[in-house]
Amino acid sequence: MATRDNSFIFNKNSGLKTILSEQQLALTVKRLAHQILENHLKLSNTVIIGLQPRGIFLSDRIVAEIRKILPGETIQYGKLDITFYRDDVRKSLHIANATDIPFSIENRKVVLIDDVLYTGRTIRAALDALLDFGRPSHVSLCVLIDRRFSRELPIQPDYAGKVIDTIISQKVKVCWKEKDTIEQVILLDS
Amino acid sequence: MKLSTKHLLGIKDLNREDIQLILSTAQQFKEVLQRPVKKVPSLRDVTIVNLFYENSTRTRMSFELAERRLSADVLNFAASSSSAAKGETLLDTVNNILSMKVDMVVMRHSASGAPHFLAKHIPAAIVNAGDGINEHPTQALLDAFSMQEKLGKLEGLKVAIIGDIMHSRVALSNMYLLRKMGAEIMVAGPPTLIPKYIAEALDVRVEYNLEKALKWCDVANVLRIQLERQNQPLFSSLREYNLAYGIKRKLLEKLGKDIVIMHPGPINRGVELDSDVADGPFSIILNQVENGVAVRMAVLYLLANRDDD
């Protein structure tokens, strides 16, 4: 089960709170990889798709973890950019990233991976984008951080690293070594 | 990041970052066009009118396809079959169309500067699809995209633009763009078709001998001889033009190196380009057409957002 810890939301003194340390983050990624495998023992029928830009850091790690657990197994792993499917295209300009899905998703089980689940709008766009590549038999969602109570659409994760309660003015920042030099998840008050 | 301009009137108004942004966005749209569903919902709330005051096959179809693949609503206007034939002015026509809640205008006109005039008078974003002998910015962008795709870079590339430089909006847009991106340019053709002082004005080389130009370049962008824009004969005959400036297979084989052949279309076969060159292994002419849709999708996508209001 995903761990729940709501104590920090009442801590009004500090503007910054660590949600996951580097060590906790590594353990959480391992757990997510195991949980995905529990439900997808036959990887031959499963595809893993990370969401651009920041979901990729998590999906890269989960895929590496699965490779460690099942060496020699082929893993179908793709990357999806949802920029052109956003519902706020004309409000602000978003720069597109590369989409790379070099296999068919028709009748496959898709595991979508993103870092933070907040309003659910990104996942709504991702589902639209995904369906343009074919008709998967099943789609599930894996996120590192689930900001529950902030949803604007009826979308829930199947795998969550950590479920947190936040208010709109707060910001969750997931830092990855490749991008931010340190590896941790923090909550910022603004 | 966003474009520094509200309209795409010409490459002249763009900076290097704008061009890079358009080309990298086009790269993502090119991927979209390989998908089973070649359509994205980005501009589903945008209506675009294609105002064509001059004939066009490739550009109009390419724009229309780009608009539809972005899920925009599309209106088509051809001057020959409209009230323009009854004497309505350009501004009246456009204002009437805009009052029907149209967001963007794609325009081709035989008068240089027509889209610039329109930009001063209407609020909608305008994309120039070719104005007289001035600019054809999306063609230059798709040419650059195709060169980059084929050769991996623009910086330092040697590009020869061959033919009717004087009357070619493709040539002018290409020269602006390639100079901004750090490519070297040589214009080649008969002296009567190359404007005086172009070397100084646009920082390009001028060459009157075709073989020398081909020996120098990595890419030859061959222009169409525009018979409709010539009020006076600037060369004696098409046959003579072909003998002196037509690209022939034999000539290319003599060079001892591979050069990329491009043409904005429509080709006058046997005049500026022989068939065995146009259809030959060095030609990327059909790639240009394919890339045109992705590049135009990028331009429309980047101009459609209303960040500022």
Image: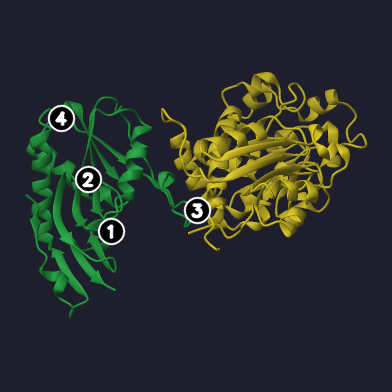
Chain colours: A green, B yellow
The answer to whether residue B258 of the structure is visible from this angle is no
In the image shown, does B49 or B165 lie closer to the viewer?
B49
Alpha-carbon distance for marks 2 and 1? 15 Å
Where is residue B276, by image quadrant?
Answer: top right
Rounded to the nearest angstrom, the CA distance separating label 4 from label 2 is 15 Å
Kind of residue indicated by mark 4 = Leu
Residue under numbered circle 2:
A59
The residue shown at (46%, 38%) is B40
Q: Amino acid at mark 3?
A: Arg
Q: Label 1: chain?
A: A
**What is the secondary structure assignment of the residue under circle 1?**
helix
Q: Which residue is mark 1?
A: A179
Q: Is residue B248 left or right of residue B285?
A: right
Give the CA distance from mark 1 to mark 3: 28 Å
Compared to A98, does B290 lie above or below? above
Which residue lies under the disc numbered 3? Answer: A90
Mark 3 surroundings within 10 Å by alpha-carbon count, few (fewer than 14), some (14 through 19), many (20 or more)? some
